[in-house]
Image (cartoon, rainbow, N blue to C red):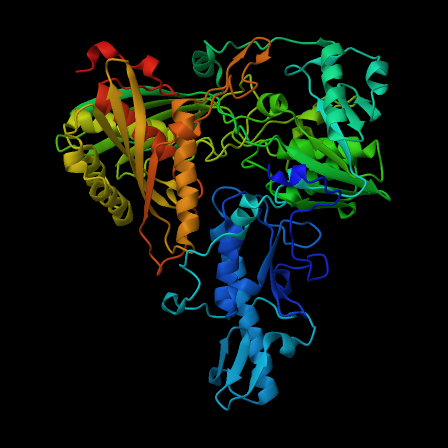
């Protein structure tokens, strides 16, 4: 968290431009819902998408400023506020630039057309005789007026008609440029940015004591010792939901520690052991759901000249957010305001409405970035809990921050997965059949209107029912190969597992691509064909081939593999089979004497269509590559019958700075094509590339994540 926490400021808020009045969003078809010009010569962009560190604030501003023909420096943005912005659902699935970017770009073009039309009518000119530069409209007869003079304080009242023509890419002045992100500058300077930094006058602090494990019931009734501690304002209990409110944050922490030491719980045991998890998934999954099926798959597998069958395992992974989840809530005059890092302020509003039985119009959710907040981590839970606590202490803003063990134990994890693959080759090395059996828990339990999806709502005296649902959504993401294969079958086996799960970056794509691209390497080996050449000859998509050819060139693939004590692996995917293309080569060094290996370098090539901001695209891709390396080499949620054991950074290690490999990203820019989602493109391919590199360097094929030196058969290393 920035150094703001050391300043002692009593009223510090992450910077948001205040030049426009707050007014509710009315209609997505109004230009004013996306673009607003104020009397002081500034432009404000409104988006329902959240800034999660992916840089969309800068990217969306570039797109808007480009179409409006205004300087980038006068543009501001408001992200995710039910009191102002459109409902764009969740910021998820690498869809912000594709979705919100498209809407904002069109709205900006419509705004420009609307303003040009006003000027043309005022001057009795043909609109084709007008031009715009830096927000100033000029005619061929040297008349000139700025957008702001033309509006004279009025709103942009036009509608989005679809008639405004977007600029041709050859005309772009801002799109495609590596414009620096102000949010990064502010972070380096220690300015308020995260919800953790938020300070409001009169704010009090809270801590919640979660149960020791799933299903535990609180049996302690006497909290007098805690109530008498200095600064404690109130102990809140509702069923097994327990929290404390104090004047200062450390007073709340000390009270939490006393509560933890003195409270007793009735705790049921987790019935599935970690050692038997993958077997349990196969034995106790529901009847398979057919996602794709080819009638001739059995025949093609039977006639294949070579067949291969393998099984791959992914453990539970956690978000492991760097800053424990935090939110601020305030009940005032029967209305609720929540400052939240949620990925979806409107779904949060809907769910809080259900939780409290309150009209949505009385709930305002204001999105503020959270430190290390992405996917469905603890952000929504902490927002609901802050509101539950604030209801017991009305009028005052209540700041709730989780403890580290809360974050690790109670967030929803990315599901464990079992992927069984079978494929057949013809004599030329072409894949003629591909059969997948996929076992997974749900990857989506976001609280979109259902209060029971908040974990603490299930602990209340009158508990809310949790309906898991959403099994297939995301489980089979990227499970169907993009490769040209005549016969494909995918059966999904849904599994109701022992740990809480939901959306982790990429959902099922990470596990599916790990298995798929590891298996492709095994098929290439069986066919005795170079792994990159094997992929290219089984692909018809020219853009897919291009990223593979490019990464081979960037890494000197044909000669690099001659290096001694090295291993090289490649992998590829088109995220969701509809977003960015990404190919990556992993390089590992092998130390036979110490029986260890080290990930030395990752080289990636990404094609995201039109690149709006190359620095932003590289940042996103580099971050995804490093995070995937951490998942692949180190991360696994440990648990036993008493609960989750991975409660801190020692029991859940992540990649440390000194362990981060050299990361290199190259962009294939296609400005003539629409931009594609890129935020989650790297995770899956990196995992398989590392597995393939370890195999290349040691001869051991590791099919169960994480890939550790202990899983290598060092006796077989030549």
Q: Is residue 228 above or below residue 327?
A: above
Quarter of the image for residue 575 reads top left
Quarter of the image for residue 434 reads top left
Image-based side of 169 in relation to 80, left or right: left
> In the rendered image, is residue 394 in sight?
yes
What's the residue at 81%, 24% (across, down)? 236
> In the rendered image, is residue 162 in sight?
no
What's the residue at 48%, 52% (across, down)? 97
Whole-percent x, y for residue 380 in the image: 64, 35
Whole-percent x, y for residue 31 in the image: 61, 65
Whole-percent x, y for residue 370 in the image: 60, 39
Whole-percent x, y for residue 40 in the image: 66, 69
Image-based side of 117 in relation to 455, left or right: left
Q: Quadrant of the N terminus?
A: top right
Which of 295 and 137 lies nearest the eye of the viewer? 137
Quarter of the image for residue 383 reads top right
Which of 25 and 297 lies nearest the eye of the viewer? 25
Image-based side of 184 in relation to 297, left or right: right
State how many labels appear: 0
The residue at the far front in this view is 7
Q: Is residue 592 above or below residue 251?
A: above
Q: Quadrant of the C terminus?
A: top left
Q: Is residue 68 above or below residue 641?
A: below
């Amino acid at each position: 968290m920035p150094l703001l926490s050391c300043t002692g400021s009593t009223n510090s808020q992450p910077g948001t431009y205040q030049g426009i009045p707050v007014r509710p969003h009315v209609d997505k078809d109004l230009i004013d819902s996306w673009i607003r010009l104020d009397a002081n010569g500034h432009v404000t962009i409104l988006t329902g998408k959240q800034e999660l560190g992916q840089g969309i604030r800068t990217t969306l501003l570039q797109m808007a400023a480009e179409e409006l023909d205004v300087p980038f420096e006068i543009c501001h943005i408001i992200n995710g506020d039910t009191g102002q912005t459109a409902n764009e659902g969740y910021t998820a699935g690498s869809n912000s630039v594709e979705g919100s970017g498209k809407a904002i770009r069109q709205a900006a073009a419509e705004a420009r057309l609307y303003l040009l039309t006003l000027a043309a009518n005022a001057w009795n000119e043909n609109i084709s005789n007008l031009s715009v530069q830096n927000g100033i409209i000029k005619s061929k007869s040297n008349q000139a007026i700025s957008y702001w003079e033309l509006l004279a304080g009025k709103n942009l009242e036009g509608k989005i008609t679809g008639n405004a023509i977007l600029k041709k890419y050859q005309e772009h002045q801002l799109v495609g440029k590596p414009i620096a992100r102000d949010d990064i500058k502010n972070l380096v300077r220690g300015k308020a940015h995260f919800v953790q930094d938020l300070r409001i006058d009169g704010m009090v602090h809270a801590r919640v004591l979660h149960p020791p494990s799933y299903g535990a019931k609180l049996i302690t009734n006497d909290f007098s010792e805690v109530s008498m501690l200095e600064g404690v304002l109130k102990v809140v209990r509702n069923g097994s939901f327990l929290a404390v409110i104090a004047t200062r944050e450390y007073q709340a922490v000390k009270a939490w520690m006393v509560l933890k030491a003195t409270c007793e719980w009735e705790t049921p045991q987790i019935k599935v052991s970690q050692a038997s998890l993958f077997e349990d998934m196969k034995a106790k999954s529901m009847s398979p759901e057919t996602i794709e099926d080819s009638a001739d798959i059995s025949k093609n597998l039977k006639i294949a000249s070579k067949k291969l069958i393998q099984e791959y395992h992914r453990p539970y992974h956690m978000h492991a957010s760097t800053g424990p989840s935090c939110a601020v809530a305030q009940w005032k005059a029967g209305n609720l305001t929540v400052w939240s890092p949620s990925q979806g302020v409107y779904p949060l509003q809907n769910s809080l409405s259900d939780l409290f039985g309150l009209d949505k119009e009385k709930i305002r959710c204001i999105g503020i970035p959270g430190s290390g907040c992405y996917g469905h981590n603890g952000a929504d839970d902490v927002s609901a809990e802050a509101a539950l606590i604030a209801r017991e202490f009305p009028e005052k803003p209540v700041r709730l921050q989780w403890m580290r063990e809360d974050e690790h134990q109670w967030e929803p994890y990315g599901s464990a997965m079992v992927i069984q693959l079978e494929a057949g080759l013809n004599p030329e090395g072409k894949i003629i059949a591909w059969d997948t059996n996929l076992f997974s828990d749900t990857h989506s339990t976001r609280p979109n209107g259902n209060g029971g999806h908040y974990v603490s709502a299930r602990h209340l005296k009158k508990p809310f029912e949790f309906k898991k649902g959403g099994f297939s959504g995301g489980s089979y993401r990227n499970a169907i190969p993009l490769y040209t294969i005549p016969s494909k079958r995918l059966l999904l086996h849904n599994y109701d597992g022992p740990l809480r799960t939901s959306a982790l970056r990429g959902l099922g794509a990470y596990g599916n691509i790990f298995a798929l691209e590891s298996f492709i390497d095994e098929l290439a080996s069986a066919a005795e064909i170079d792994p990159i050449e094997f992929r290219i000859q089984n692909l018809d998509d020219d853009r897919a081939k291009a990223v593979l050819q490019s990464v081979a060139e960037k890494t000197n693939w044909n000669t690099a593999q001659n290096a001694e004590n090295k291993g090289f692996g490649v992998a590829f995917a088109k995220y969701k089979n509809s977003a960015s293309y990404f190919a990556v080569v992993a390089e590992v060094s092998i130390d036979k004497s110490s029986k260890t290996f080290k990930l030395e370098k990752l080289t990636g090539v990404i094609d995201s269509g039109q690149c709006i901001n190359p620095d932003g695209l590289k940042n996103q891709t580099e971050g995804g590559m490093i995070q995937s390396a951490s998942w692949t080499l180190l991360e696994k949620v440990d648990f036993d019958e008493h609960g989750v054991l991975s409660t801190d950074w020692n029991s859940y290690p992540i990649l440390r700075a000194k362990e981060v490999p050299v990361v290199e990203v190259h962009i294939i820019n296609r400005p003539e094509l629409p931009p594609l989602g890129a935020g989650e493109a790297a995770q899956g391919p990196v995992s398989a590339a590392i597995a393939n590199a370890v195999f290349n360097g040691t001869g051991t094929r590791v099919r169960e994540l994480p890939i550790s030196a202990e899983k290598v058969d060092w006796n077989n290393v030549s």
